[in-house]
Amino acid sequence: MVDRPQTIAYPAPDARPSSRDGEPLAPHVIVLFGATGDLAKRKLLPGLAYLAQSSLAPDIGVVGSAMDDLSTDEFRALARRSVESFGTHKIDDVAWQAFADRLTYVPQGAGPEGLTAAVKEAETLLGPGCRRLHYLSVPPKAAEAVIGMLRDADLTENARVVMEKPFGHDLTSAVRLNDFVHSVFDESQIFRIDHFLGKE
């Protein structure tokens, strides 16, 4: 028998056995850049809808943003189609409406001021103690502009940012982007992730 590397990550002995243990998580406003793109429609919006109705996530509000000039109602309709087409968990009308009420949309053409207003409104609905999670589901060439918008919108405090791979298009551009991100966010606020939509 050939020894193979371990491929399953088991919890540490002192890990919490359930996400419901311990202190409750603070409510989060999730700002989803690239909210009308393929990854958002196939994975992120259905996943957020499921998390919102489960006991696995804190209270959330989602502010979608993209280049498309949509209204909030049009974005909610897009999200509903995404959940129905790609979601693996069925959501009834009551659960859907509860999630839809937490969805807003601001086109990137509204600029930093429009983004700030949308986030502040979502934070007001969720109450005090909100945290911010900025999710960049955008191509590498757009990442720097989005980070700059977050800086200009003054939305970096009490926030984390999730950046998808590819991070730049080569080593030089990745280093330059990393330096720029560090001029706006501390390393402890940055999460770089990969996703699998590009795999066969």
Image: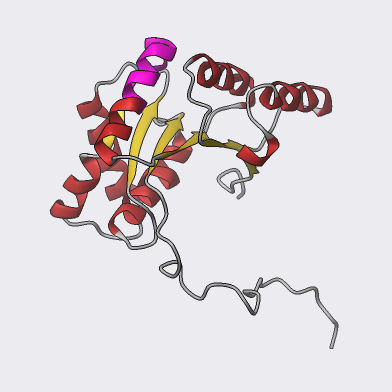
- Render colour scheme: secondary structure
Residue beneath the point at 39% across and 20% down: 116
Q: Is residue 17 above or below residue 180?
A: below
* Range drawn in magenta: 106-119
24 with respect to 164 (left or right): left
**Which part of the image, by quadrant, shows the N terminus?**
bottom right
- Prevailing secondary structure of the magenta residues: helix
Q: Is residue 36 above or below residue 53?
A: above
Residue beneath the point at 59% across and 48% down: 196
Q: Is residue 24 above or below residue 106?
A: below
- Residue 143, position as x, y percentages in the image: 60, 24
- Membership of 108 in magenta stretch: yes
Q: Residue furthest bottom?
A: 1
Say if residue 190 shows up in the picture: no
Residue beneath the point at 35% across and 37% down: 62
17 with respect to 81 (left or right): right
- Residue 119, position as x, y percentages in the image: 36, 27
Residue beneath the point at 37% across and 11% down: 110
109 with respect to 70 (left or right): right
- Membership of 155 in magenta stretch: no
